[in-house]
Amino acid sequence: MSEVLLKEMYKELVEIRRKSEVIEEIIVPKEEITKEEMIEIEKLKEESLKGENISWKDLKKELNL
């Protein structure tokens, strides 16, 4: 392939990506969260990564499932 053709293909791909991002923003609205919510999310993430959680088996037993 020639360099010119590759450049044209690249420009077309960039444009397709831009359009797909615009469509994504329309379809998937952004959700604003408070600082407190973000702190809670980070706390839960850290607990999860440290292994501080309940097993699925114990949870089902606790919920009588």
Image (tube, helix red, strand yellow):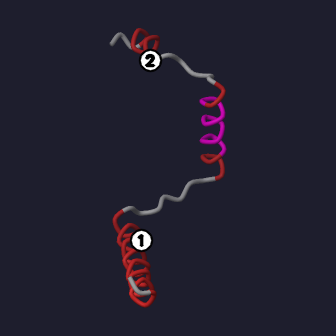
Quarter of the image for residue 57 reads top left
Mark found first going from the N terminus, 2 or 1? 1
Decide: is 34 above or below 8. above
Number of labelled discs? 2
Q: Which mark is nearer the camera, 2 or 1?
A: 1
- The disc at residue 56 is 2
Which residue lies at the image location 53% right of the left edge and 18% below the top edge? 54
- The disc at residue 49 is none
Q: Main secondary structure of the magenta part?
A: helix
Which residue lies at the image location 48% right of the left edge and 58% below the top edge? 31
Which residue lies at the image location 41% right of the left edge and 9% below the top edge? 61
Q: Which quadrant holds the N terminus?
A: bottom left
Q: Position of residue 10 (x, y in %)?
A: 43, 80
Q: Position of residue 8 (x, y in %)?
A: 40, 87
**How dense is the environment of label 2, judged by Cα within 10 Å: few (below 14), some, or many (20 and up)?**
few
Q: Position of residue 51 (x, y in %)?
A: 62, 23
Task: Inspect the magenta stretch and tell me whether residue 52 lies in it.
Answer: no
Q: How far apart are the two marked residues, 2 and 1, measured between alpha carbons?
A: 37 Å
Q: Which quadrant holds the C terminus?
A: top left
Three-letter amino acid code of the residue under disc 2: Trp
Decide: is 3 above or below 13. below
Look at the numbered disc 2 and give the secondary structure of its residue: helix
Look at the numbered disc 1 and give the secondary structure of its residue: helix
Q: Residue furthest bottom?
A: 4
Residues drawn in magenta = 39-48
Front residue of 34 and 3 = 3
Three-letter amino acid code of the residue under disc 1: Glu
User: To which residue does mark 1 refer?
Assistant: 21
Q: Position of residue 2 (x, y in %)?
A: 41, 87
